[in-house]
Image (cartoon, grey):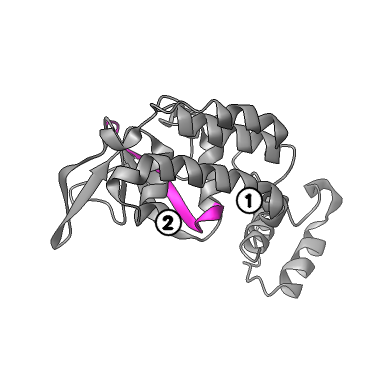
Amino acid sequence: MDNLVCLLNNTNKDCDFTSKIKSTSYIENHDKKEKINKYCNFLFCLLDNFDLILSNTPEADKSMAFHKRISEILSQIDEENLCEKYKYNTKHIKGNKLQHNILSCSKDKKLNLLSCIYFFNDYYKTHFKIVDMNTNTIFRTSMKDYTDGYLCYDKNFYILNTLPIHFKGALSENTDTCILNEDIKIKNVYQTYLGPISKYKINELKDIATQNNIVIDAKIKKKDLYDKINSQMLNLI
């Protein structure tokens, strides 16, 4: 955490994202129009909609409160050992690198790192699907069964609880075309319940599935069964 102190001390005091909030847009969702705020920084967008402290802060104090909350979350990653709590695979997500990424994205509106989304999915227990309104594409960012939230982007970022009724976007698993920078290439950033697939015979995997009350098809293929067990056990964390 020491290497973050200098970065925190050097935070640009003029990095005032609140001046970029636009709240005049309306999105028609089903039988009502939903008022939305638009943001130039995706982390400010997430926290202002999901963080109870920041979302209830008076508008004039939001910029200072945002950077304070980022600092508190960075400390929390260490103090509560959140990377271990969330069962991240340290080959893909390490605490000090995650802290650096979050801090960097909080200071630079042009820096949008996918690793930060992975973390805040777990922090807020929400699957933030990235919606590129320019290409009509939806990107999944979590393997867990969290409630969906939509981080949308046109020229700015904004949050929707449901997608507009006119939106006809296609779901994509290929985040390398996502509007966020894919700083982590692998989709599963978690420790897996099972060891390498080569360690198991299919009957052994079926026994493991039965022991954990995982319903499987009699003709399921080994790779599919292996993936299903890992996925089901991941959602028990």
User: Is disc 1 placed on a helix, strand or loop?
Assistant: helix
Please state which of residues 136 and 203 is positioned toward the viewer in this rendering. Answer: 136
The x, y position of residue 210, in whole percent, is 73, 73
Span colored in magenta:
122-135
Q: Which residue is mark 1?
A: 76
User: Is disc 2 placed on a helix, strand or loop?
Assistant: helix
Residue 94 can be seen, yes or no: no
Q: Residue at x 47, y 56 (%)?
A: 126
Quadrant of the image containing the N terminus: top right
Task: Indicate whether residue 102 is drawn in magenta.
Answer: no
Quarter residue 222 falls in: bottom right
Mark drawn on residue 53: 2
Per the model, the C-alpha gap separating discs 1 and 2 is 15 Å
- Identify residue type, mark 1: Gln
Image mark count: 2
Please state which of residues 165 and 96 is positioned toward the viewer in this rendering. Answer: 96
Q: Pointer 2: residues within 10 angstroms few (<14), some, or many (20+)?
A: few
Q: On the picture, is 159 further left or further right than 111?
A: left
- Establish if 203 lies above or below 171: below
- Establish if 46 lies above or below 206: above
The x, y position of residue 173, in whole percent, is 48, 40
Quadrant of the image containing the C terminus: bottom right
